[in-house]
Image: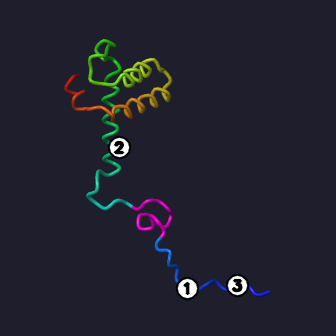
Amino acid sequence: MRSRARDSRPDDRGPTPGAAHATAGGRPARAPAGEGPSKSQRKREMLALQELGESLLPLADDRLQRLPISPELIDAVRAAREIRAHEGRRRQLQYVGRLMRDIDADALRAAL
């Protein structure tokens, strides 16, 4: 029995969707320079928000209520106060930092 030879006609289906935006490993290609902040800059901004969130921990509950933050963030700050395990507290503070991305950090800094 003879094996079939592969059809030598060119593929007319066009490029694979996303091929122009992917590398050989299937990962997205780097964004061209000037298209938003770098990964390092985004990490610095996230850490700054996390530190701002950490500065809310010692505030009294009535003071937290007066700040321009969501009730969900207030609950997360209260939970972070009670966590004593290092890793659990670290993860809770990351969550607080994540919630901080949804608020106006400049308004919060001004209110503090």
Name the residue at 47% across, 60% down: 27
* Mark drawn on residue 9: 1
| Position of residue 76 measured from the top left corner of the image (x, y, whole percent) | 41, 24
Q: Amino acid at mark 2?
A: Lys
Q: Are marks 1 and 3 in contact (CB under 8 Å)?
A: no
Name the residue at 39% across, 22% down: 77
Magenta segment, prevailing SS (helix, strand or loop): loop
| Residue 75 or residue 52, whichever sits in front | 75
Name the residue at 41% across, 64% down: 21
| Position of residue 102 measured from the top left corner of the image (x, y, whole percent) | 33, 34
| Position of residue 1 measured from the top left corner of the image (x, y, whole percent) | 80, 86
Secondary structure state at the residue bearing disc 1: loop
Answer with mark 3 or mark 2, whichever residue precedes in sequence: 3
**Residue 73 occupies which quadrant of the picture?**
top left
- Spatial CA distance of label 1 from label 2 is 49 Å
Secondary structure state at the residue bearing disc 2: helix
Q: Which residue is tagged 3?
A: 4
Secondary structure state at the residue bearing disc 3: loop
**Residue 99 occupies which quadrant of the picture?**
top left
Numbered range of the magenta stretch: 16-29
| Position of residue 24 measured from the top left corner of the image (x, y, whole percent) | 49, 67
Q: Amino acid at mark 3?
A: Arg
Q: Identify whether 59 is placed above or below 94.
A: above
Q: Which residue is tagged 2?
A: 43
Q: Identify whether 19 is placed above or below 60.
A: below
Residue extending farthest left: 110
The 10 Å Cα crowd at callout 3, few under 14, some 14 to 19, many 20 or more, is few
